[in-house]
Image (cartoon, grey):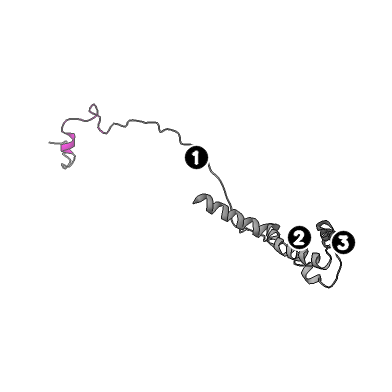
Amino acid sequence: MKKLISILLLSLYLVSTTEVYQLFKIPTLIEHYCEHKKLNPEMSLTAFLRTHYDHPVKDGDYGKDQRLPFIIHSTPLSLVFTINQGFTFETATYHFSPLQIHKIPSKDEDLCCKGFLNSVWEPPRSSFS
């Protein structure tokens, strides 16, 4: 299914952006050659192509001649994308370095006096007693 969708999208793209659509006019070329062949049975295919493509002339069937493939070239579909002037695109590379672990003691047994934590909330004592 993906292959079919890919072929379809590629075909649509080529037909709309190039002159591949001119190939769809080949049946018109064959019909026009048959008309000329009826008028002049001795006309070869190369003479027909030379008459219409090498040195085209304005004759009675000029309107039909203009519908032949690769006679009139048109500008293919052009898709243009613009970016706003205020738009900036920056790439940044982040290099994360490993963190260095510093152990901070939460409680140092050597600096704490016994009973210090219990006496913090007591009012100060006077030293004159």
Sequence-wise first label, 2 or 1: 2
Q: Which residues are magenta?
A: 106-119
**Across the whole image, how many numbered discs are drawn on residues?**
3
| Viewer-nearest residue: 32 or 87 | 32
Q: Name the mark on residue 40.
A: none
| Viewer-nearest residue: 97 or 107 | 97
Q: Within 10 Å of the Cα at label 1, are there few (<14), some (14-19), or many (20+) other Cα atoms?
A: few
Which part of the image, by quadrant, shows the C terminus?
A: top left
Q: Amino acid at mark 1?
A: Tyr
Residue 108: in magenta span:
yes
Q: Name the mark on residue 94.
A: 1
Give the residue displayed 85% in from the left and 71% down from the top.
59
Residue 5 horizontal side relative to residue 61, left or right:
left
Cα distance, mark 2 to mark 1?
A: 56 Å
Q: Name the mark on residue 70.
A: 2
Q: Amino acid at mark 3?
A: His
Decide: is 28 above or below 114: below
* Nearer mark to the viewer, of 3 and 1: 3
